[in-house]
Amino acid sequence: MKVYENLRDKEIIRKVNEVFYEKVYEHPWLSLYFKDVTQEFITSQQTDFITGAAGGPSKFSGRMPSNAHPHMFITEELYDLRTQLLKEAMQEVNAPIELQDFWLKLDESFKNKIVKNSLSECEKRFTTDELLIFENPDTHKKAA
Ligand code: HEM
């Protein structure tokens, strides 16, 4: 995997994630899912995950994305909204196109595992887990 090797700026993945999670934590809907996780933690964890996947140092020791979200009600609308924020973050920091393509394809490959079509597809990982189910607070949408 040469994506990491080809990066002139090895800090670019962290830079993308810093801007990306700034947007996530400011977002009225997406931010609700992150209420129990600090921005610093998820920024570092996601940086380690993408860095490792791109062929860089493998520091990531968390769960694979397919096992990290079973208790979250993530609709396709929410998923696509997250992708949009990620694209904006990558463009704002001028991430190389090769990295952008790799990152978006990687995320896309987990989409089916993460997106739920109904509430019944959500399950707790542990008994202490709280299901995370939030409606889109965008009132304009509801009125339509
Ligand atoms: C709308 C979509 C998504 C939402 C709302 C979301 C939300 C979250 C939250 C809240 C956590 C923290 C969980 C915890 O610490 O208990 C998390 C962890 C994580 N997410 Fe996502 N996520 C989304 C999509 C994705 C995608 C597309 C990927 C990558 C393909 C991804 C990769 C990860 C990884 C690697 C972790 C860390 C897993 C762990 O160590 O437990 N997520 N996500």
Image: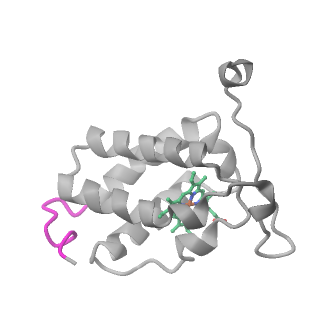
Residue reaching furthest to the right: 127
Residue 88 x %, y %: 36, 39
The image quadrant of residue 11 is: bottom left
The image quadrant of residue 132 is: bottom right
- Give the colour scheme of this rendering: one colour
Left or right relative to 49: residue 5? left
What are the residue bounds of the magenta stretch? 2-11
The image quadrant of residue 128 is: bottom right
Q: Residue at x 58, y 42 (%)?
A: 77
Left or right relative to 105: residue 39? right
Q: Nearer the viewer, residue 107 or 45?
A: 107
Q: Residue at x 49, y 66 (%)?
A: 110
Does residue 112 show up magenta in the picture? Answer: no
Report if residue 41 is visible in the image.
no
Q: Residue at x 79, y 70 (%)?
A: 124
Where does the N terminus fall, quadrant-wise? bottom left
User: Is residue 22 depicted above or below 103 in this figure?
Assistant: above
Does residue 3 show up magenta in the picture? Answer: yes
Report if residue 126 is visible in the image.
yes
Q: Main secondary structure of the magenta part?
A: loop
Q: Nearer the viewer, residue 93 or 40?
A: 93
Residue 104 x %, y %: 36, 56
Left or right relative to 35: residue 57? left
Left or right relative to 7: residue 106? right
Residue 103 x %, y %: 34, 60
